[in-house]
Amino acid sequence: MQEYENIRLKREDVIKFAQYANLNEKDLESLIEIILQYSVITYKAYNKFNTSIVYE
Amino acid sequence: MNKNFKDFAKGKPVQEDATGGYCIIYNRVSSKEQLDGQSLETQMEKCEQYAGKLGMTITEKFGGTFESAKSDRERKEFNRMLDFLKKSKKPIKAVIVYSTSRFSRTGSTTIIEEVEKRGAQVRSATSGYDPKTAQGKFIQNMELATARLDNDIKRATTIDNSISALRKGRWIAKAPRGYDQKTTKKEQTITINDEGKKIKQAFEWKANQNLTNEEIRVKLQAMGFIICKQKLSELLKNPFYCGYMSHNFLNGEVIKGNHPAIVSEDVFFKANGMLNKSHSNGYEVKMDKPDVPLLGTIKCPHCGRNMTAAISTKMKKKYDRDIYYYVCWNKGCKQNNSAKIVHESYVDILSGYGLPDDLTDLLEMQMKKTFAYLNQDSAEQASSMKSKLTKIENNIKQVEDNWALATDQRQADICKRKLKELDNEKELIESELQKVENVSLNLPKYIEYGIEMKNNLLNIWQLAELGEKKKIQNLVYPDGIVFNKKIGLIEPLSVNKFIALKANKTNLYDINNKRTISQIDQLSLNVPEAGLEPAQP
């Protein structure tokens, strides 16, 4: 998700949470990626969801 | 000789000397610069003097403009002259040119032969040869060949210079859409224009959202960027947009240019990687069919390759509609699964997955950032679409006025057709605008929605467009899925370790994707704390 590079959570932001502090680098990257992707997909789904309500 | 024998003689009678009779003049220059430099005037003067010397009467003058002699057939004035020779009632004995090179630079004598077939000779005002004599003809042919050689040398020099310019990062042709270009002999300035921003968006849609070319084309059209699907496909494959140059002169090399890149190399390759994914194992896998969204995710359980989609002709005849199958064409695999059954199983398993609750804080943090970014993007898109909409509405008003004032049926028909086109365009933009404007929502509601839906990936998948569906599939099942025909169920090859398996998925199984948030609120979202342990399908 190169387009969203500037909004991706920073490693430091994530490890502030105790439960993620001991994650290895690979898992940390994977977690940041899934959170980012989910937020983008949800944003678009929310748009569609609202459009469907408007037209119902 | 008895004059009566004249009718029985063979061969053409020997013509009298060229002096006297009618002639025409043909002149040209090869560039605007020469036109401005009054080269034509000089040529014409010489030709007139030569015609006078031969005692000939000039009936018509051709040329007087710049046209290249590299291709004889592409010159308008030249062809008009040939046509005149054919149709002239007065016998034209000569076509006077300033020099033979002005006449043709292809080196071919064919064009001179065509003039001769029409009974005229090509005469050069500067050489003064008589083309009816063997020596004169030889000189004429030599001059033609020299002109060709001169052209070839110039061409080779131009190509060398072009290659040298390309290797220095200077583009030698017209810059593609999305760029403005100012080129002088000394310097070249290429800048990104407003269309460039839309092209950037198209690349990102392809790279990040895996939208189909048709989806991108429609979105671009709504933003006022009209392009056909084929041209869009070419555009997305042009490395110029990521700062590189590809040209026939470079013999297969791609070189970094001095012009600004519209997208990064990563985005370009990602966008094109997705294009290439459409071809697998020698078969074209249709990645953009909404009826078979699992293409690219579903693998053959036998060989592990991507399955493709096929329509059963037998079933089509029987039910008069397309019945899709996921198939593997690999020899020996014999995999052939009804898309309907596969989808039922897919919905069943996806309904069992969600994001664990302990990700809520992180999600909220990320969603704030995403909202700020995408909302700004939507506002820009909406502004561009609104401006386009205003233009179309003005055009519609204008056409309606014209229709009211139409004086005959033909004008009325044209207005009617135009109005229909504009109405369709308006409808499309309004529909896209509606989508974009709905994105400009408030942050708390978006976060509320996102947190609620994290337990319901199925609903998100059902709401998503094809490209987004594929993203969700890749997110949840990074290695894909296979369909086990024996038990009639989908089996994931792997599941993302941060995706949780819900204990009681039936709570969400029959969710209706048109449900309101308050209704979703009432659902029991029974998701266990999967934490960081790998979720088991």
Image: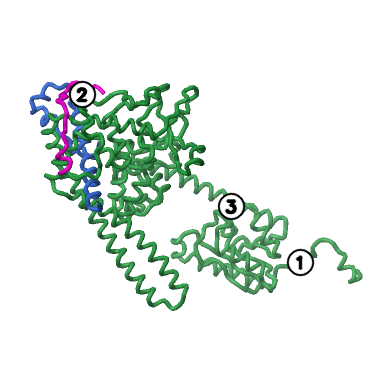
**Residue B139's x, y, as percent?**
65, 55
How far apart marks 1 and 3 lie (CA) works out to 29 Å
User: Residue B376 vs residue B269: left or right?
Assistant: left
Q: Quadrant of residue B412?
A: bottom left
Q: Secondary structure at mark 2?
A: helix
How far apart are the two marked residues, 1 and 2, measured between alpha carbons?
94 Å
Chain drawn blue in the picture: A
Which residue is denoted by mark 1 in the rendering?
B15
- Residue kind at label 2, given as amino acid type: Lys
Instruction: State if disc 3 and disc 2 touch (CB < 8 Å).
Output: no
Magenta stretch in the rendered image: B518-537
Pinpoint the chain carrying mark 2.
A
Q: Nearer the viewer, mark 1 or mark 2?
A: 2
Q: Which residue is mark 2?
A: A26
Q: Is residue B379 visible?
A: yes
Q: Is residue B534 magenta?
A: yes
Q: Residue at x 42, y 21 (%)?
A: B302
Q: Residue furthest right?
A: B2
